[in-house]
Amino acid sequence: MSQNPEIGSLTGVWTYRSFHNDPDLKTPYDQYLFGSGYITI
């Protein structure tokens, strides 16, 4: 059975961030951020 998602509720600009997996909480933010961008739907 297929479903029809309510895409209207997702419309907008979303921020995307990707991080390296580093459990050390003392690591500065700029060292574990892998990439970032915007997704527009």
Image (cartoon, grey):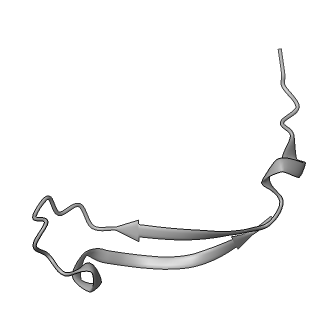
Q: Is residue 10 above or below residue 39?
A: above
Instruction: Give the image location of residue 17, x and y in percent.
Output: 47, 70
- Residue shown at 89% from the left, 50% from the top: 8
Residue 12 lies left or right of residue 4; in this view the side is left
Give the image quarter of residue 29.
bottom left
| Residue 41 place in picture, x, y as percent | 81, 64
Q: In the rendered view, does 24 fall on the left or right side of 30?
A: left
Q: Residue at x 83, y 49 (%)?
A: 9
Return the x and y of residue 11 as percentages of the image width and height: 83, 59
- Point out the residue furthest to the bottom here: 30
Q: For residue 39, which quarter of the picture?
A: bottom right
Q: Which quadrant of the rendered structure holds the N terminus?
A: top right
User: How many badges with numbers are in the image?
Assistant: 0
The residue positioned 14% from the left and 58% from the top of the image is: 23
Q: Quadrant of residue 3?
A: top right
Q: For the point 84% across and 22% down, which residue is it?
A: 2
Outermost residue on the front side: it is 26
Q: Nearer the viewer, residue 28 or 20?
A: 28
- In the displayed structure image, the side of residue 14 where residue 30 appears, left or right: left
Picture coordinates of residue 10, whole percent (x, y): 79, 53
**In the rendered image of this protein, does residue 5 appear above or below residue 32?**
above
- 40 displayed left or right of 24: right
